[in-house]
Amino acid sequence: MSGLRLIICTVGLVCFSFTNNLAQTAGRPKGFVIGQVTERTSGQPVPGARIAVKGGAATTSDVGGSFRLEVESGVYDLEISADGFAPIIKNQIAVTGSRNTLLNVQLDVTVSESVEVRSETFAENTEQAVSNVTLSREEIRQTPGSGGDPLRVINSLPAVSAASGEFADLLVRGGTAEENLTFIDNIPVQDFTYFTDKYDGNRGGRASILAPDIFERAEFSAGGFGVRYGDRMSSALDVTLRQANRERVQGVIFADSGTAGGSVDLPLGKRGSWLFSARRSYIDVALDVAGIAEKGIIGYPRTLDFTNKLTYDFTPRQKLSVSVLNFFEDFEQTDDQAFNIDRRTDRFRMRRTSRRLVAGATLSSVFGEKTLAQTTLWATGAHNDGAFYLPASNFLQRSRDLRDSQFGIKEEATSELTKNLQAGFGGGLYFDRADYFTFENTGRFYSPLEEEFNAAPRSNRLRLDATTSAYAYAQATWRIAPRVSLTPGVRLDRYGVTQETLTSPRFAARIDAAPRLAFTFAAGIYRQPPSLFVLSLTQGNRSLRTQRATHLVGGVEWLARENLRVRFEAYRKTYDDLVVQPLRPTQNFASDGNYFNTGRGEAEGFEVSLQKALSGLFSGQASYGFTRSRRRFSDGGVEFPSDFERPHQLTLIGVTRFRGFTVAAKYRVASGLPYTRRTPVTTPFAFIQRVARESDINALRLSNFASLDLRAEKRFAFRRWSFAPYLDYFNITNHDSVVQPNYEFYQQTPQFLSENQRLPIFGLRIEF
């Protein structure tokens, strides 16, 4: 391992030195920032908007809101302003010689007499008053400890944690990875990760399905989100893919220790463009080269994905966007690897595959002067299968063959009725189909956990034929005074899977006590139907109902400077009708495997954060979060910590830039996860671990998690291209973070598995 790290670091230094010598003689060619400025609510172009480099070149938008700004190669902060609109700053816009950087900007109408300039990261969102953050492509790329993975960047936010360093799942404010909603270009996406364990280990995935190069922006809400979003109880992630420029063919090539790919911008005349991106992983090859493939760390994972985004303007008032994404993944684990896995319940020879399609088309239409409507037609499909065998045998322990698809259409509209009143409304109709086969064998040959050891073999098939669901929503943002805005809304859902019609009222408010000081509040009801996978496990699960969470969020934020914000938020989530599989302290409790809607829970806590936007010499974040998350199997039952509760979490991130270098560090320390106290029961040949009492569930806690991650990047600008090598180093101190207990048949007490080493990532990005 140490030899591999030395090789990687040496190669990186050689590349830095070589490209630095070239760049010193390359000159300073000019590139272009192009795009359009529009009003967020109505979609109308904003003519006469000023787009300026801070302290440098400037231009104004034309009658159609379009602009073109010529600047030398480099990285800039741009300020965009217009009369009657709140000005914003777009940070870290990278420009390469003879290359177009596309920058589309949305401005919000303001009624305040004095308006503060803000970084877009801290821009007010009239629809989302609390717990909201917007991440740009550069912020995603430059966050340390992420390897450019968007999910790991979001995981660095104050309200989010993860099960371990291996997983990139999002655990938001005491919730689970299954409670998060994701949209890609207005398309609902069921799973945003590769190599997920949600079907077999109650955990999320290892990596995001999207490369950072194809992002335009990612808007994340940790709670209290508006009625436009439904079907999940914790968070909402709204991803917008970038558009290709319409003036010239240009591309990007990227590669690192585990993946390689690229993207190309193809103009389709002056009215349209096509972005194409492809990416393939070669982690399996890297593990072989590193000499650790047989250690049984993660098996042999392989991925391949393609992204297409086409845009075309029929008229200045009607624009079409089409997104088509394909994802392929394979995950193999050999007998040798299985035997070397530390945790007994993960020791399988297996192969899992997944094939996914995400496709959608959105027609944006402007009506009159104040209304923007978006009609989206989408289709998604997935096929996940896998077979899990005990090593060195043909004993099948688990089998999955999961096929599902969804087709839908929705309409969303926003309108500025008056200067002080904005309205949003919409609805959708979608159809789900599924064919799920699941098989679970008895656990007597592999698991010392009593609930698995005594489980009977069972197989089930769920066939869902075109089940129809629908929803509608309406909300209004009313500025009752220049400094006070209220956003009431209501959502109506008809869930075809559960045959329920449910109403979810929500409310948000923002009070600007001073030009830079605001108080925020949100409350609402959030619904989540049971997953198709849980419904497929047993016949008894077909009667499960929709789960419910009630959010209360309040906070205060102070904009100390245009790029520096201090925020405090407190929250409480109350869960009802949770889908649970109770752990009863009886020998045969798992004989049927049924789930029930009897679960209850609460999650409460607060977060305080200091965040400096990505600009200037230094940026970063310091945050502390406290969470108390409890669950019960039934009303009035014994209360215990939720599986992913981390009561305390401290995150420190720092980024500095000098002479074209970017150096960043992230340190996170968090409470250990809870685990269950088990009592060993002696059998003639082994120890079986029993949950003796409900009060033993998650009664113990692992040691603290900690990780120090470093990232270094150098950007070299040449006459017609740029080159940016980087190094991501995870857990540089090799802190031994315990992540889970392990039980063996021949030992009374558990062993504890830890993560202390992860491969550094050396990568590069070329723009041309």
Image: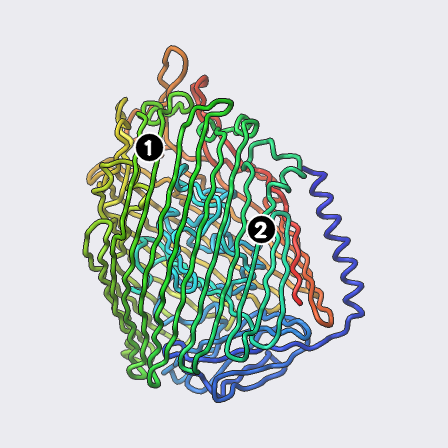
Image coords of residue 283 (percent x, y): 60, 43
In the rendered structure, the answer to whether residue 12 lies left or right of residue 314 reads right
Q: Amino acid at mark 1?
A: Ile
Image coords of residue 384 (percent x, y): 42, 43
Neighbour tally class for label 2: few under 14, some 14-19, many 20 plus, Cα within 10 Å = some
Above or below, 131 relative to 111: above
Q: Amino acid at mark 2?
A: Arg
Residue with the mark numbered 1 = 697
User: In what element is the residue under mark 1?
Assistant: loop
In the rendered structure, the answer to whether residue 193 lies left or right of residue 176 reads right
User: In what element is the residue under mark 2?
Assistant: strand
Q: Is residue 161 visible?
A: no
Above or below, 207 relative to 183: above
Residue with the mark numbered 2 = 280
Depth check: give the residue in front, 439 or 550.
Answer: 439
Q: How is the image coloured?
A: rainbow
Q: In the rendered image, which quarter is residue 676 located in? A: top left
